[in-house]
Image: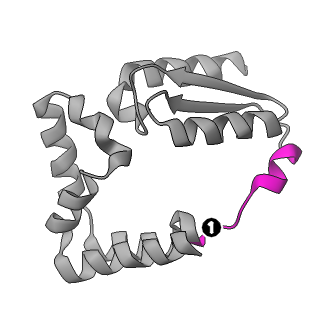
Amino acid sequence: MARLKHDHQLAQKIRHEGLAQFVDFWENIPLFASQKSLPAHRLAQLRERRLKANPLGLARSLEGIGTGSQPSMWQTLKHIKQPVLLICGTLDEKFCHIAKRMQQELECSQLTLAEHAGHTVHVEQPHFFGKIVSEFILAQN
């Protein structure tokens, strides 16, 4: 319930303060602190992409499919029989803990940790991310 309330507050922030102020806020939350080590040109690219988002669509996304509005799926994980790849940046302790819990519940899963990366492994280490995803997919054939 707290997360749902938080998501709605973020959506209101977008509506009342505008996209640029929301992006300023979003880029500075602790979850994305590890992105600060990216090269300046990469940070500029990310910011430019974020500023092109549709503010109303982003607000509605937070309200309609944000983490707070999603049902818990923990009880269903044990029923998944397909191979699952879990990826976590070691600097993201909270989500690495969650990934390790998920791995225990998933019958056929592989957890890959990305050293020196945080919550956004695909952004912080795109080549490593692409390599492990490609290898995982190829191993399933």
The residue to which callout 1 is attached is: 70
**Is residue 20 among the parts visible in the rendering?**
yes
Q: Position of residue 16 (x, y in %)?
A: 22, 83
Count the marks: how many? 1
Q: Nearer the viewer, residue 27 or 123?
A: 27
Residue drawn at x 55%, y 63% is 67
Give amino acid for label 1: Gln
Q: Is 80 positioned to the left or the right of 57 in the image? A: right
Q: Tell me what residue is drawn at x 55 percent, y 23 percent.
A: 113
Q: Is residue 135 a member of the stretch shown in magenta?
A: no
Q: Relative to 20, is 135 above or below?
A: above
In the image, the segment drawn in magenta is: 69-79
The N terminus lies in which quarter of the figure? bottom right
Find numbered disc 1 in the image and state the secondary structure of the residue it sits on.
loop
Give percent across and percent down for residue 48.
15, 50
Q: Quadrant of residue 87?
A: top right
Q: Is residue 87 left or right of residue 109?
A: left
| Rendering quarter of residue 132 | top right
Q: Position of residue 59 (x, y in %)?
A: 36, 74
Residue visible at 45% across and 19% down in the picture: 115
Q: Is residue 114 above or below residue 4?
A: above
Q: What secondary structure is the magenta-colored segment mainly?
A: helix
